[in-house]
Image (cartoon, rainbow, N blue to C red):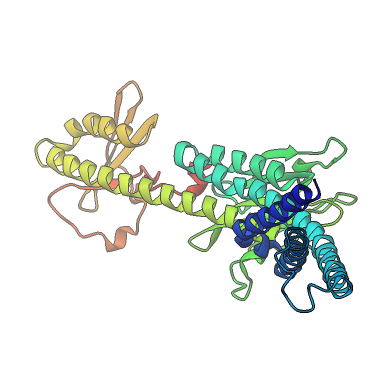
Amino acid sequence: MVTAVQLGAALFLLAVLVLLARCRERMTTENREGYRNIVLGVGLLSTVATAFLAQATGAIDAVPFLSEPIFFRLTTTIVSIAGVVLLSGGVSTWLPISRATRAFTRTRITRLELIRKIEQVVDVEPRLTAILDKTLTHMINQIDLPGGAVYVAAPGSGTMRLLAFARNDERFETDPDSITVRAADRQNQTAGEFESVIAEYPDGSVRADVVLPVLVNGNPVAAFLLWTPAGGLDNDDRMLLLLARDIVARALQMSMLAEQSRYRRQADELSRRLTALLTSVAIPDAVVPLMRMLREAVPSDLLSLTTACGDHDIRRYTVAENETLLTEKSLGRDALRFNADNFAVSTQPSIITDFEQTLEPGLAAMLR
């Protein structure tokens, strides 16, 4: 019976050693010193168990010193104490660090989901405003922030408008509409990217802890305002937010480049068609077809064309949405939108367009 127990103890401890060897890479990653002490402790205890098994079977009766009962008990006692001390120290060191490491790893994995989710949004969502809105929601949820807001550039204005507001804590209160977000003065060449956007708060308002400008070609087109928990954010969380911001900035950049490429193709095709039209028919007959062509590119209700043959024969053709044509003749020089003194007199009509709406897209217009 005693031999069976000793055999079981020795086999159990040897099996633990084998298991520790298989888990070496993961355990040493968490805490190398604790793992080393655990292995040494289990190794010493398994040696003692094997020695007791050998004594019970008579395998060490002929071994000097070990065959002496007093020496054997003294040696095994010392080795057992050393094994227990090493095992206890290793476990007490490795377990807390292991728990902390695993908790940290779970937190990192959860928050790295932010990057994966934003990349998915960028891949499937064609609307730039939806990308910014969903990115804000993912930032708030994955980083566990109390609240946040995203502002986008308004066409023809340096002030940004509120696009979306989200909060993760019902107790968090702020009025994002009362916050004025605008692009910084471009004359300040020394300002960094974080100084490219200025947020102005009313008295008594809670200031955002993190302001993340979204820059495209060096110009701010959007800005995330984020409020952090009482303990603030660690460096890893801040780097994660910056990485998420950069993904969104690249998506806006690519969208703008794609839209500008589409515009250039459209403009080249429109120029070709206009040239063919104006060289085949007279100006009065070309105004209505010209209106149709331009409306394919930019929806418009009114088109006005001014033609000048020399300095005296100046005419304006205006066509409405219903294609009604109005012709004005014998106009004065003030009808021209450019410096008439530099206009070369010609016997052929030259077209000066009053249709000044540009076709080339900007991000501010795309973020409406």
Instruction: Give the total of numbered labels.
Output: 0
Q: Which of the 4 image quadrants contains residue 94?
A: bottom right
Using the image, determine if residue 251 lies above or below residue 219: above
Left or right of 2, for residue 19:
left
Q: Residue at x 76, y 60 (%)?
A: 49
- Could you say which is closer to the camera, residue 82 or residue 331? 82
Left or right of 327, for residue 148:
right
Q: Quadrant of the C terminus?
A: top right
Q: Which of the 4 image quadrants contains residue 290?
A: top left
Rendering coords of residue 332 (x, y %): 33, 47
Q: Quadrant of the N terminus?
A: top right
Residue sitting farthest toward the left: 280
Q: Residue at x 84, y 35 (%)?
A: 170
Using the image, determine if residue 343 lies above or below residue 328: below
Using the image, determine if residue 327 lies above or below residue 41: above
Q: Residue at x 73, y 45 (%)?
A: 148
Residue sitting farthest toward the bottom: 64
- Could you say which is closer to the camera, residue 207 or residue 13? 13
Residue sitting farthest toward the top: 322
Q: Which of the 4 image quadrants contains residue 21?
A: bottom right
Q: Determine if residue 314 is in view.
A: no
Q: Determine if residue 129 is in view.
A: yes
Rendering coords of residue 43 (x, y %): 72, 65
- Could you say which is closer to the camera, residue 323 or residue 65? 65
Left or right of 351, for residue 132:
right
- Could you say which is closer to the camera, residue 17 or residue 363? 17
Rendering coords of residue 179 (x, y %): 76, 48
Rendering coords of residue 233 (x, y %): 77, 58
